[in-house]
């Protein structure tokens, strides 16, 4: 049981959690923006995916900054 706990709290999984959260945020932003008629032609799955990847990199930088403070 302790080994499983270590796996879920490892740095790799923490990174996965951050990136998954940012992808969810990208989907939410994409959904909100799709309701704005002027932006609808520019939104497609690729745009939302790229936004998620950008947000993932931002989250990585935030996570690194927070890790260096403690």
Image (cartoon, rainbow, N blue to C red):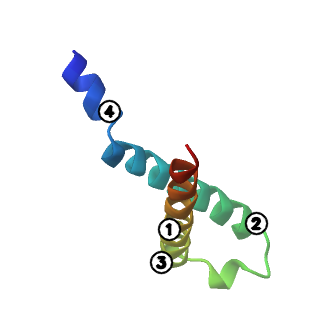
- In the image, taking residue 30 as reference, residue 18 lies left or right, namely left
Going 61% across and 55% down the picture, which residue do you hit?
25
**Neighbour class for label 2 at 10 Å: few (<14), some, many (≥20)?**
few
Q: Which residue is mark 3?
A: 46
Q: Earlier in the sequence, mark 1 or mark 2?
A: 2
Q: Nearer the viewer, mark 1 or mark 2?
A: 1
Q: Are marks 4 and 3 in contact (CB under 8 Å)?
A: no
Where does label 1 land, which residue? Answer: 57
Write down the residue under mark 4.
Answer: 8
Residue visible at 41% across and 44% down in the picture:
14
Q: Which residue is mark 2?
A: 35
Q: Nearer the viewer, mark 3 or mark 1?
A: 1
Dot placed on the residue nearer the N-terminal end, 4 or 3: 4
Q: Earlier in the sequence, mark 1 or mark 4?
A: 4
Q: Quadrant of residue 44?
A: bottom right
User: Which residue is painted at 67% across and 62% down in the image?
Assistant: 29
SS at badge 1: helix
Nearer to us: label 2 or label 3: 3
**Mark 4 surroundings: few (<14), some (14-19) or many (≥20) residues within 10 A:** few
Quadrant for the N terminus in the image: top left
Q: Label 1 vs label 2: CA separation?
A: 26 Å
The image quadrant that residue 32 belongs to is: bottom right
Whether residues under marks 1 and 2 lie with C-beta atoms below 8 angstroms apart, the answer is no
Q: Position of residue 61 (x, y in %)?
A: 53, 63
For the residue pair 5 and 28, the one nearer the viewer reads as 5
Residue mark closest to the camera, 4 vs 3: 4
Q: Decide which of tag 3 and tag 1 comes sooner along the chain.
A: 3
Quadrant of residue 10 within the rendered picture: top left
């Amino acid at each position: 049981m302790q080994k499983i706990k270590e796996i879920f709290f490892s740095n790799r999984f923490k990174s996965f959690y951050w990136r998954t959260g940012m992808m969810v945020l990208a989907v939410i932003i994409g959904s909100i923006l799709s309701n704005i008629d002027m932006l609808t032609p520019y939104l497609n799955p690729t745009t939302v995916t790229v936004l998620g990847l950008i947000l993932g990199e931002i989250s990585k930088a935030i996570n690194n900054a927070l890790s260096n403070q403690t």
